[in-house]
Amino acid sequence: MLRTAAVILWKDLRIEMRTRDAIGAAFVFSLLTMVIFNFALDANTPEMRRLAAGFFWVAFAFSGTLALNRSFALEKESGAGRALIFAPVDPAGVYLGKFFANALFLFITQVIVLPAFIVFFDATVVASRWWALAASFILGSVAFASVGTLFSAVAANTRMRELMLPLLFLPVTVPALIGAVETTAFALGGTASAAFWFKLLVVYDVVFVTVSLLIFEFALEE
Amino acid sequence: MKQRQIADNILVYALFIWMSVSLVMMFFYAPIESEMGIVQKIFYFHVPLAWNAFLGFAIVFFASFRYLATRDPKWDARALAAAEVGVLFTTLVLITGPIWAKPVWGIWWTWDARLTLTFVLWLIYMGYLMLRRYIESPERRAVLAAVVGVTGFVDVPLVYFAIRWWRTQHPQPVIMGGEDSGLDPKMATTLWVSTAAYLLLFTVLFRRRLALEHLRHELDEYRAQRDHMKGAM
């Protein structure tokens, strides 16, 4: 299972290194969302700065969907999805590989969007709370990738896959989104404690990685 | 088939009588609430609809799970019927809620835990129903919908706790005097009668929807046979 996961992960990483489709699109889209926020809400006021963590995660929720959409679209277009189904490998391994690739793409996107975000919203990370920022990025990426990978495989089989993924994926990620926003807000000095949100994110990640691992084989078959 | 129809007819008559009794109780037996006045009556529609909608989503989860385990199309049909009636009831909950909230709270909507959870549930199961429309093959549709039906329900407790905790940290725009605390016994009785009435309505709609799905399935089979025969000639 782990070997399958490693092979799939390596394949997706190589594709991404050559095309930079997922991260590139998600990065540009995140910047775009921030520009729109600025116009819609006038981000240069102190109150808006307090809500910066929210802006960041909304931008990321939408741009992340873009990246996740590509995850199984590639396999579908090239017919490699069918090959994956017929290959004598554990579907859980396919899921794990895809999941790690997606989580990594989402995390890298966040890391490269962060400087732009800090500049645009005049956000400062509290010195002793960098760990909380890192935790919200890692746990948030894992949360998005866990359900995102599963639903991306589901949506890839529909007629309207670009449309279907956000409709299915965003409502289900609501708890993770709240947890990630609050943990990031804590790192930016907006709130006093993030212990509960940290735990919520961990629980969300464990629950949805487990559920997805168990159920993924059904989403893959044809 | 004959027995099914008889059972359906009995259910419909029972629903008619029970729902009438429940309406009479709502307006003539249950006292008028001292502070909210007549608008409080919406409570007897709103709460039973919400409870039965949640029941519907629980059935979606169970039926989806059973479908993945057995691959029996009847479980898929049950999940679909429960999801449709559940979404219908949730829609009514989301409409009746604000009608009550505006005169009582002074606002149509607040992002309180229960309201937000209901709204998020509505979105999840609308997504579920839309997904079904965009997949041609019946088997693929059943399997993929079941995947979403199971995953979506696992999310419910997480959504609830996340929003509840989030709410307690942020200022509440309205004070929610818990409706269940110190409910007048006559009101409580009416609420239970009404809940049973809506459970009956749920059952009738659910069974009708299943019968419709069954007919559709038969029609598809006849069409397939016809096309097959055309191909042979």
Image (cartoon, coloured by chain):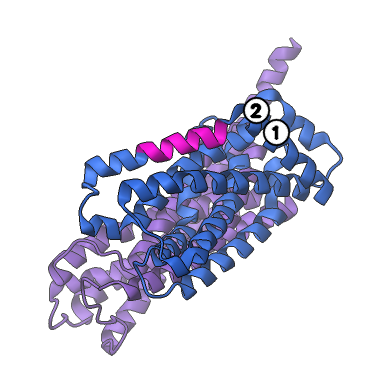
Chain colours: A blue, B purple
Q: Is residue A192 left or right of residue B41?
A: right
Look at mark 2 in the image and give the residue it sits on: A18
By secondary structure, the bulk of the magenta-drawn segment is best described as: helix
Q: Residues within 10 Å of mark 1 (few under 14, many from 20)?
A: few
The x, y position of residue A138, in whole percent, is: 57, 57
Report the chain holding disc 2: A
- Please report the residue visible at 22 percent of the width from the left and 59 percent of the height from the top: A47
Three-letter amino acid code of the residue under disc 2? Arg
Specify the segment rendered in magenta: A21-32
Q: Is residue B21 above or below residue B98?
A: below
Q: Quadrant of residue A59?
A: top left
Three-letter amino acid code of the residue under disc 1? Arg
Q: Nearer the viewer, residue B108 or B196?
A: B108
The x, y position of residue B196, in whole percent, is: 41, 72
Q: Nearer the viewer, residue B21 or A190?
A: A190
Q: Answer whether labels 2 and 1 touch (C-beta < 8 Å).
A: yes
Report the chain holding disc 1: A
Camera sees residue B84: no
- Please report the residue visible at 61 percent of the width from the left and 53 percent of the height from the top: A146
Alpha-carbon span between mark 2 and mark 1: 6 Å
Q: Residue furthest top?
A: B233
Look at mark 1 in the image and give the residue it sits on: A14
Q: Secondary structure at mark 1?
A: helix
Q: Residues within 10 Å of mark 2 (few under 14, many from 20)?
A: few
- Please report the residue visible at 39 percent of the width from the left and 39 percent of the height from the top: A31
